[in-house]
Image: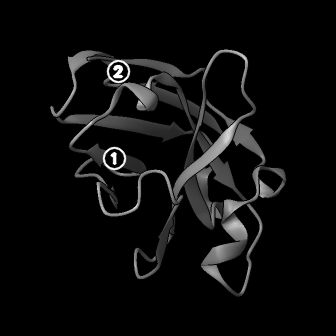
Amino acid sequence: VQLQASGGGLVQAGESLRLSCAATGRTGRVHAMGWFRQAPGKERAFVAAITRSGRFSTYGDSVDGRSAISWGDAENSVSLQMRSLKPEDTATYYCAASNTYLPNVAYYTNAQVYDYWGQGTQVTVSS
């Protein structure tokens, strides 16, 4: 599975941004997709995840209430809509795919359950 993230850029605080991740290859075994982010000097942090069915999703505390993850219009693509962006949202955002079925979407907050990672897209929020 190959993942291609896009949609990052430079925005001002308070604005919105939509990230997309396109999955190609052997995607038939993907059970969930997620987004993580990493700011300079910080560890990679969970942002959001969604199960293949789209019925279940979960969000990191830092973006909960300001973000929405969904399957995109294109097959095997996932979008992350972020609004009310803050300077602390500045980071490289990575999408990831998991081939592991887990009984609770909360388990997909763990980076270790993901098998494939995209190259990252930079989001910079100016104050």
Q: How far across and how far down the image is residue 71, in percent?
A: 34, 58
Q: Amino acid type of disc 1?
A: Ser
Residue pointed to by mark 1: 79
Residue beneath the point at 64% across and 50% down: 97
Seen in the image, is 96 located left or right of residue 13?
right
Pointers 2 and 1 in contact (C-beta within 8 Å): no
Figure check: 127 above or below 5: above
Residue beneath the point at 32% across and 33% down: 86
Res 65 quadrant in image: bottom left
Figure check: 54 above or below 83: below
The residue sitting at the front extreme is 127
The residue sitting at the left extreme is 15
Q: How far across and how far down the image is residue 28, in percent?
A: 60, 60
Circle 2 crowding by C-alpha within 10 Å: few under 14, some 14–19, many from 20: some
Label at residue 8: 2
The residue sitting at the bottom extreme is 103
- Disc 2 to disc 1, C-alpha distance: 12 Å
Circle 1 crowding by C-alpha within 10 Å: few under 14, some 14–19, many from 20: many
- Colouring chosen for the image of the structure: one colour
Figure check: 79 above or below 6: below
Residue beneath the point at 45% across and 77% down: 53
Label at residue 113: none
Q: How far across and how far down the image is residue 85, in percent?
A: 27, 36
**Upstream in sequence: badge 2 or badge 1:** 2
Q: How far across and how far down the image is residue 47, in percent?
A: 53, 50
| Mark toward the viewer: 2 or 1 | 2
